[in-house]
Amino acid sequence: MRQAVWMITFEAAPLVKVGGLAEVPSSLAEELSKRGWDSVVVLPAHGEADRHGGVQLGELSARQGTFRFSRVELRRVHYVLVSGGALDDPRVYAEEVLPSKVVQFAVAIAEALGKAELLGLPKPSVVHFHDWHSVIPLLKVKQATEGWGRPALIFHVHLAVRRKLGEELLEAAGLPLDWEHDVVVGGSRRRMTLGEALRASSGIAERLGALEADRVVTVSRSYMVNELSTLLGSELAGKARVVYNGTNWRYQELIDEVLAQHGDKLRALTGEWPPNRRSLRRYFLLNALGAMPQGEPKVPDAKLYEKLREIAAPPVRDDLRVESFERDGPLVIATGRLARQKGFDVLAEAIPHVVKELGTVRFVLMVLPVWGGEDYAYQLMELAREYPGNVRVVFGAAPSIYKLAHLSADVFAAPSRWEPFGIMALEAMAAGVPLVASKVGGLTETVADIREHGYEGTGYFVEPGDPYELADRIRDLAAFMEASSSGALERYLGKISDEQLRRMLEELPDSGEIIRKSCIERVEKMFTWERSAELAEAVYLEALRELEGLQQRA
Amino acid sequence: MRFYKVANWIMAMAKSIFIFALHFHQPVGQSLLVLDRIQRNSYEMLLSLLERYKHLRLTLHFSGPLLRYWRDRYPEFLERLRSVIQSSRFEVLGGTYTESPLILLPPEDKLEQLRRGRQLVEGLLGVSVRGAWLPERVWDPTLPPLLEETGYQYVLLDDEVGYRSGLPREYVRRAVLVEYSGRKAGVLFIDGPIRYILPWRSHEEVLSYIRSFDGARGEYVLWGSDAEKFGEWWERDKAERWLSLFFYYLDGARDIELLTPSDYIRRYGYAGLAYLGPWSYDKMNEWSGGYFPNFLRKYRESNNMHKRLMFTRDKLLRLGAPAEAWEEYYLAQCNDAYWHGLFGGTYIPLLRQAVYEHAIRAEKLAEKEGGYYLGRKLVIRELDFDADGSNEIVMEAPLASVFLKPSDGGTVFELDIKADGFEHNLVNTMSRYPEPYLGEGAPRPDWYRRVSFREHIWRREARLDDWVENTPFVDSSDLALASYIVEYIGEDEVCLSRVGRNWFSPTSFVRVYVVKVFRLEDLGRTLRVKYKWRNMEKVFADLRLSVELSLSPRLPYDSEALPTYEVDGAGERPATERFSSPWARVVVLRSQAAPRVVVESSKHGEVWVSPLYTWFRTEKGLRSEYQGLGIVYNYNVALNPGEAFETEIRVSW
C-alpha cells in the first residue's frame, strides 16, 4: 500500500510564498511523490483560496470555528488550503493575527486528520511539520491520534526563532495542560503532562516541538551542531537528522527559460544567438534592469510599499522600478529578505570599498522588504543614490529579471549573519555564479571555498559582519571573473589580492569558467530536491521503525 | 731643551690647509637668456682668472648639463677651459651625469649617473677624476659600493652631515671613510662657517679664519660652493676683484697650503670610519624638513615629475629602449626642478618643462623601438602612478598621453603632447603653496592642485577673481576634491563619476551626479571630455556648474615671451591678462614654442581666463612667476528632478 505523508506548513510555493521556506514542503512533497509517497501539503489559505480555485473538499466545525478545505493538485501533490476565521487574513505572518492563525490552523488539521476519508484525503503514516507555526498543530495531531496507531511526527526546523508559547495559546487550541501523553527522550518513552512538557522546554516552541516529535529535521549539519544543540539540549539533539534543502534550478533550464522570456529583445541588442554570458549581462544591466513590467517589483504589503515609494529617488523610480545602468561591468548580485539576518547592512558598508578599488563593478541587490527592516531599506536606498553608476536596489519581487540576473552575474554576495541553510547559495551556484559567503550555517556546507578546493571551489568564505573582508573578497572574485571572461588579465590582475586566484588566472586564463562549471556541478550532484527527498524518506522510515518498536513494546 | 725648540719651530712652520672647490652648474631647461648672462658675467670672468692662476691647487667641478651647454653652445669656451685644465695644477671632480639627486633614484640609475658623469668629464676635459661632487651635496648612505664600482675614491659633503651623524669636531675636520655593504668611500667635509664669509667678507677675515685651523693635526678648511656666486649672485666687477685678490693672497701665503682633496688624502689619509645619515648642508636640511625626498611630499608637482621618471623607466625597460632613449631619460633627472629652497627650483616652469620634455622624448623613442602601438590606437592602464595608494589612469596614444587622477577630483594632472620638437606637458602648471617665508598678506595658497577638468559649483555671486584668488566658500559643492569612481574603462574611453553635494545652506543640499567620459582621439590630437550633470533629487535645482582647466602651453627657452589667448575670436590677449566673457565657447592658446591649442565647449557658457601666478623666494628676493593659464567654463543650469545637463569640452592641438 502506498504510504502517505502530510506536510504542515504556513507557506508553500507556488500558492503562498513569503520566504525560502515556501519551496521546501512543495519540493519535498513533489519528489516524495515520485518515490511512491502520497503527498499532501496542508496550509492556511491566507485569504487566497478563491484565487487558486481548486476542489472544495468540505467544511468541518470545531469549538474554534468552521473551516473549509479546498484542494489544488499540482505536479502530483495535493495542496489543501484551509480557510475560515483568522486563516482568511491575507497577512501571512502579521503579528496581530498570528496566534489566532496558529490555533485555528492546528484545530482544523486535527479535525481533518480525523475525517480524512470524508475529505477524500489519504491517511498519513508520516506528518511533517515545518517551523514553529506548526508546533501547536503537531500537538493537536498527537492528541487527536493518540492510541490508534498514530503517524510518525517529524518536526522540521528551518529557522529557530525561539518563540515562546503561552499556556493560553495551548488552551485556546483545546490542549489542556494536564493532558498526559508519551514523549520520547533519549530513545526511551516517558509519560508527562503537557504542562510538564511546556516547562521542560521553557515554553520555547522549537524545544517543545522537538520534545513531542519523533524526529527533528534540520537543514544543515552546522545549524544542527551550532544552533539546535544549544537550544534543544543534547538529549533532544539525539533525535535530530539533517535533510538538506535542494533547488530545482537547472542550468540549462534556466538558460532556456531566460532566453524564452527575453529572446527577442536580447537578439535585438546583442545580435548574436545564443548570446554568451557577457552579452546576457550587458542586456540585463543596460536594458532589462530598467524595463521591468508594471507591477514589478512587487511588495505585497501595501503600507510598506508606500513607505518605500516615499523615500524613492533616482535611480529608483517612484514606482520602485529602477533605471538601467549606462555602462556594463562585472556584476555582483545579492538576494534575500531585508532582515538583519541577511546582513545587507554589512554589504552596504562593504560596497563603497569595493567601488573605490574596482569602480567598474555593478551591484544589483534584489531584496524583499519586510516590516522591521525599514532601516535597512533606508540604508540601501541611500547607497543606490550615492552610487548611481554602481548600485541598483530592487525592492520587492521581480520575477521578470530574477533568473536573468543570476545568469548575468559574476559573483553572488551572501553576507548573512546566520543562515540555517541559505537556499540563495544553491540558486547562485545552479546559475554558475560563485559566491562570497559568510562562513555560517548551511553556507559552510553548500559552498566550497576556493582556497581549499581550488578549481573545484565555488566561492569564498568570509567572517560574518566584517565589511572589509567582504569587500576584499568581492573585489577579488569580481576582478577574477572579469579577467577571465574578458581576457583582460593585465587590467584586472592588479585588483586581486588573493595570491591563489592570481595564480589560477595565470595558469589558466579561463579559470572563471572552470569555477562556474564547478558551481553548477556541485548543485547538480549534491543539492537537488531528489537528493533531499531521499534523505527525508530515510528519516521517515527510521521514525516509523522506532514508532513500531515502541508500540510493540507497549 | 733643544728638542723643544725644534718642535716649536716645526709647529710654527705647520701650514693651515685650505681646499677651494668651485662648483659650476646650470640646470637642464635653463633659460638661454639667463645662461648667456651667466656665461658672460661669471664663467668668462672665472675662466680668465683660472688661466692666470693655473698653478694653484684649485678644485673644480663642472656639472654634466653645463658641460653639455658649453659643448653645444660655447665650444670655444670649452676648448679654452680644456686647455687651461690640462696645463694646470687643478683637480677636476666628476659626479653625476645630469647633476641628479641620487637619493631619489633607483640603484641602477645611480650607478649609471655616476658612470656617465665620469665619462663626460673625462671625455670633454681630458682629465681623469678621482672624486665626485654630489648634487646638492645630499648624502645617500647606500652609495659606497656604487662609488667604488664607478671608480670614485671620495665625495665632498658638508660638515653638517658629520655633526648630525654624531661625529666629533676633530673628525669633521679630517677625511673619513664611510662603508656600506662592505665597500668604502672617502669623505671630505665642507666647512660650514667659511661658506658664510667667503666671498662676502674681507680677505683678511677669510684668511685669518683659514689660519685658525691646525694643519699639523691634519685639519683642513674646505670651501665648496657655487661658482656662480662670482659674477651672477655678486656683480661681476666686485666678484672678480675679490677673487683675483684672494688667489693672489693664497698664492703668496706662506702659512696656508692650498691642496686638492686628492692631495690631502694622499698626505693625511683617513681619520677613521664613519657612518653618515642622508643629510646635506644646513639650509637644505631645513628646506627639505631633514630629508631630501620630502620635497616630493611637499610639492605634488615634484612628485609628479619624479613618478613620471619612474613610469618612463619601467616603460623603457619593458620595451627594450635604445640608448638614445636612456640618454633622454637621464637628462630628465637634473635635480633643480625637483626641489625648492633659495632658488626658484620647482617653481620655475622651464625647468619642469624640460623634465617632461626629456621624459616624453625618451618614452617616444622606446615606444617606436618596442612597437608599442602595434595593432592598437590607444593603451589604457590603471596603476598607482604617484605612489599614494590610489590608482591613477594613463591613456596613451602615439601623439599624446593623458594622466587621470580619480582620487583628486577626477582631474587630468598631466597631458603630454608628443609631437616631434614640441614635446611637453600641457598641464605643467604649479600650485600656490603656503611657503612659510611668504608671511601674512601673501596671496592665498591654492586649496587644490591647479590641473585640468576639475569641477566646481559656484555660488551665484562668485566672480573670476574669487576663483583665481581662492576666496573661501565660493564653491558650494564638494566636487573639486572628491574621489571619483572609475566607472568604466573601454577600448578608447574612460568614464569617471561621482555623486557630489551642492550645499545651498549648511543644512540643505542637492545631490548632483557628475559623469565625465574621457576620450583620446586622432592619435592623441584631441582630448574629448563628455560631461553629464544630473540632479538626483526630487526637487528642482538651480546650479552654476563649472569646469576648470589649467594649461601651460610650451614656453620658449630663448625668449621671455608668454603665450597669448583669444576667446571666441574676440582679439588676442597676453597671458598676463584676466578676461571674463559672459557667453563664449572657444579659447585658443598660442605660444611661440608650441602648436596652437584650442579649448572648446560644445555649449556656450560664461568663460573666465586668467594667468596663474605663484610667489616664491629666489636668491634675488621674492618673485611672482607665470605658471600657466586657468580657463573656467561656467554653465548656469536649472535642472528638474532627475534631469541632466550635458556638455563636452574638447582640447585639441
Image (cartoon, rainbow, N blue to C red):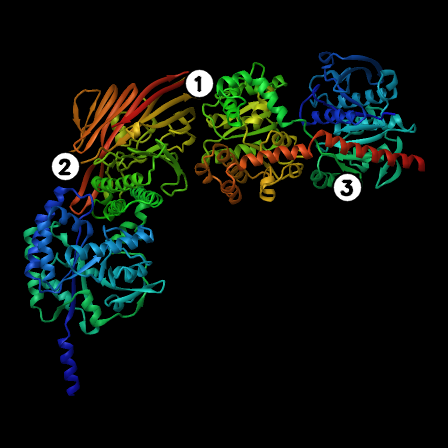
Residue that numbered label 1 is attached to: B642
Kindly report which numbered mark, 2 or 3, lies closer to the viewer in this rendering. 2
Tell whether A169 sits left or right of B170: right
Q: Nearer the viewer, residue A486 or A382?
A: A486
Please provide percent x and percent y for residue B238.
6, 53
> Tag 2's secondary structure?
loop
Tell whether B467 sits left or right of A473: left
Subunit ID for the residue under disc 1: B
> Tag 1's secondary structure?
loop
Residue that numbered label 3 is attached to: A233
Subunit ID for the residue under disc 3: A
Subunit ID for the residue under disc 2: B
Q: Nearer the viewer, residue B117 or B58?
A: B117
Q: Amino acid at mark 3?
A: Gly
Q: Amino acid at mark 1?
A: Gly
The reply to whether the C-beta atoms of the residues labelled 2 and 3 are less than 8 Å apart is: no
Q: Residues within 10 Å of mark 3 (few under 14, many from 20)?
A: few
Residue A172 seen by the camera = yes
Q: Earlier in the sequence, mark 2 or mark 1?
A: 2
Residue that numbered label 2 is attached to: B560
Estimate the spatial distance between the alpha carbons at disc 2 and disc 1, rounded to whole Å: 50 Å
Query: Residue sitting at 65 percent across and 27 percent down?
Result: A249
| Quarter occupied by the C terminus of chain B | top left
Query: Residue sitting at 9 percent across and 63 percent down?
Result: B204
Specify whether disc 3 shares its chain with disc 1: no
Please provide percent x and percent y for residue B376.
36, 32
Tell whether B329 sits left or right of B408: left
Whether residue B65 is situated above or below residue A11 in the rendered picture: below
Residue B218 seen by the camera = no
Specify whether disc 2 shares its chain with disc 1: yes
Q: Amino acid at mark 2?
A: Glu
Query: Residue sitting at 21 percent across and 48 percent down?
Result: B342
